[in-house]
């Protein structure tokens, strides 16, 4: 028999192959099992991990549960109740649909599941290790499911060796649980590591509470609401959520949460729309934060394109991208984005002296909600004894996974509810109230006769030939304007508008300038000649690697054209990047703008501020640096110890 004979692999091998695709690390297990709980209609989900999920993961929910005659089938590959035919794949409304999660997890771990549905009088306990049945028996428990995953990858040593440290793996799980909690504010999540409560959400359907509880109050105060389109209005697309102000960015994209039909996913299309919306608002190496939920008809989005279902594909990507882009641009332009220099506020803006809200799942979800409302003043309970692990069975197989005890936590859920439950009204509809609490000054009410929130500024003086000192009509504090950044924004918007209209102006040089290039630079310039011509340059090939520069964009300082073209070539060749119109115009605007150390007259300063106020986004230069900083009266009082 030939050694390369084709044969069908046995079930154990195929399950491990599937596990390698679906289960990357403990966080993958947590995500898959939480999705199963949500599909089962759970309103309360507890996640307990030990040693970063490497030793054990326990997921407990109050969902529909699984009947005894279905429990073994549930652990077979491609066994699912979510779809029935191939056509159903094109209209998936649930998180799971392939029937791979349970079989994959069970094939590489020691799994114990205890479950009971509403019909049966007694529950079922099923133990499966490495894909092999160990035990199936009756167990006393409440309605719902608790599943314990021990010794993940115990039979796949190469995969287990690839796991990171306990801290890193716990961090991955915390991120996954946070994402699921943010995407499902109507479900109560309780997450603990090594018997220590990490965070807990009330499941009241208030996204703002979850943002504060999971990501922090400081981050939330730097978010802006997004709401665009709605099925209720007969539209096919809808998006809502929050995005960060341009001045509040991060060095990485860790805190970017996207949900499509409540499914936590990554989409390069949506990500590109976000990047386009923030173009010229933030530096290129910075990332905005967002929690966005996109609602779209199920039949025009394909969720079956990635092993872990993390990525999706839209039928009409351009339509979706443009829709999201317009929604984000509308939100960014409707909010004041002036950089405010504010005094440091005490860390205990929300007092951190309480304990976690008391959760008791012995009652029904409604009674549970009523109980919290009745005990607002007594919603914190302290427990001195060590917290019991959820899902531990007694010798008599008694199992009540609704008795989840309370522990202390750094943040108080009830305090968050008091501070944030009416957050839209408190923060966004009445910004003056928030800013007075924060010792900030709202700039929205300062704008007059303008469709933006940029204030009507009057220049007072120029400092060091670089910065303009100005006041607004209210004279609450003062403003510092970077004259180079401001003029860069003005010139960039002017060039972009002219380019969009096809009438960008070029000025011919009396004496053409010679540009000598390397072969690589010459090839790149030849390929992108049209792009530079559209930006206002007039170039002519003069033989070999030499070009003549005959014209430059209007207002470009004399003698800077050759160096600017070389800078553009260096920038793209160094980054191995494809040139685009906006980046070229951004570089032109920078070179053509008023430089630092240039003395301006009072009339020139007035004209500069007036032009800045009329730009689309006056708060930043095209590179994302601030044009204006507001020093509030409160900051002055603090500085002078008054």
Image: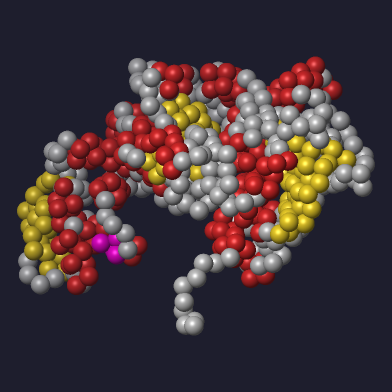
- The image quarter in which residue 144 lies: top right
Q: Position of residue 268 (x, y in %)?
A: 41, 47
Q: How many marks?
A: 0
In the depicted structure, whether residue 279 falls above or below residue 370: below
The location of residue 498, given as percent across then percent down, is 19, 37
On screen, residue 90 above or below 7? above
Q: In this view, does 575 lie above or below 369?
A: below
Outermost residue toward the front in this view:
1
Please give the name of the residue rendered at 11% of the width and 57% of the height, measured from the top-left corner.
539
Instruction: Residue at 58%, 39% (x, y): give it.
Output: 81
Side of 285 relative to 507 (left or right): right
Which residues are the magenta region? 569-573
* Residue at 33 percent of width and 31 percent of height: 616
Query: Can residue 532 be seen in the rendering of this structure?
Result: yes
Is 364 part of what is drawn in magenta?
no
Q: In this view, does 93 lie to the left or right of 582?
A: right
Of 599 and 583, nearer the camera is: 583
Relative to 113, is 315 on the left or the right? left
Q: Is residue 271 above or below residue 319?
A: below
437 sits to left or right of 530:
right
Question: In the image, residue 486 lies at what x, y percent?
Answer: 35, 38
Q: Is the magenta stretch mostly helix, strand or loop?
A: helix
């Amino acid at each position: 028999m030939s050694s390369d004979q084709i044969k069908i692999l046995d079930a154990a091998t195929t399950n491990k192959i599937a596990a390698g695709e679906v289960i990357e690390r403990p966080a993958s297990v947590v995500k898959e099992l939480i999705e199963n709980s949500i599909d089962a209609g759970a309103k309360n989900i507890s996640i307990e991990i030990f040693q970063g999920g490497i030793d054990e993961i326990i997921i407990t929910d109050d969902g529909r549960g699984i009947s005894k005659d279905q429990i073994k089938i549930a652990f077979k590959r491609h066994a699912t109740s979510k779809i029935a035919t191939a056509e159903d794949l094109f209209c998936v409304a649930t998180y799971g649909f392939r029937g791979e999660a349970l079989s994959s997890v069970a094939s590489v771990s020691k799994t114990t599941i205890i479950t009971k549905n509403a019909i049966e009088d007694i529950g079922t306990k099923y133990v499966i290790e490495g894909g092999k049945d160990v035990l199936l028996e009756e167990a006393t428990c409440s309605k719902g499911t608790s599943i314990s995953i021990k010794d993940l990858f115990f039979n796949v040593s190469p995969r287990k060796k690839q796991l990171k440290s306990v801290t890193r793996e716990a961090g991955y799980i915390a991120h996954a649980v946070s994402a699921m909690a943010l995407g499902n504010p109507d479900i109560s999540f309780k997450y603990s590591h090594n018997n220590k409560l990490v965070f807990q959400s009330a499941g009241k359907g208030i996204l703002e509470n979850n943002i504060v509880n999971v990501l922090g109050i400081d981050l939330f105060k730097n978010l802006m609401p997004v709401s665009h389109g709605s099925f209720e209005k007969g539209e096919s697309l809808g998006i809502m959520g929050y995005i960060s102000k341009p001045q509040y960015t991060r060095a990485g994209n860790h805190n970017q949460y996207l949900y499509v039909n409540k499914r936590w996913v990554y989409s390069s299309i949506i990500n590109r729309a976000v990047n386009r919306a923030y173009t010229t608002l933030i530096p290129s190496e910075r990332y905005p934060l967002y929690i966005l939920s996109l609602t779209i008809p199920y039949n025009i989005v394909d969720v079956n394109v990635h092993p872990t279902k993390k990525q999706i594909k839209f039928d009409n990507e351009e339509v979706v991208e443009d829709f999201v882009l317009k929604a984000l641009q509308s939100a960014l332009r409707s909010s004041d984005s002036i950089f405010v220099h504010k005094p440091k506020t005490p860390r205990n803006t929300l007092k951190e002296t309480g304990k976690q809200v008391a959760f008791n799942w012995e009652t029904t979800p409604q009674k549970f909600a009523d109980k919290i409302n009745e005990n607002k003043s007594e919603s914190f309970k302290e427990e001195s004894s060590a917290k019991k692990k959820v899902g531990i069975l007694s010798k008599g197989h008694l199992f009540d996974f609704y008795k989840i005890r309370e522990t202390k936590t750094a943040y108080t859920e009830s305090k968050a509810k008091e501070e944030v439950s009416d957050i839209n009204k408190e923060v966004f509809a009445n910004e003056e109230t928030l800013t007075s609490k924060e010792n900030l000054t709202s700039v929205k009410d300062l704008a007059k006769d303008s469709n933006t929130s940029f204030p009507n500024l009057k220049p007072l003086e120029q400092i060091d030939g670089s910065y303009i000192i100005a006041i607004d009509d209210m004279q609450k504090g003062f403003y510092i304007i970077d004259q180079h950044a401001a003029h860069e924004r003005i010139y960039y918007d002017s060039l972009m508008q002219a380019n969009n209209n096809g009438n960008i102006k070029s000025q011919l040089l009396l004496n053409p300038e010679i540009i000598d290039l390397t072969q690589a630079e010459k090839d790149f310039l030849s390929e992108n000649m049209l792009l530079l011509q559209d930006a206002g340059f007039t170039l002519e090939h003069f033989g070999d690697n030499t070009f003549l520069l005959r014209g430059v964009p209007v207002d470009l300082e004399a003698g800077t054209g050759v160096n600017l073209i070389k800078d553009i070539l260096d920038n793209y060749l160094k980054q191995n990047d494809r040139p685009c119109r906006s980046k070229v115009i951004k570089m032109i605007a920078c070179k053509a703008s008023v430089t630092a150390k240039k003395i301006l007259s009072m009339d020139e300063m007035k004209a500069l501020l007036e032009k800045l106020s009329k730009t689309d986004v006056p708060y930043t230069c095209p590179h994302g640096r601030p044009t204006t900083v507001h020093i509030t009266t409160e900051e002055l009082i603090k500085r002078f110890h008054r």
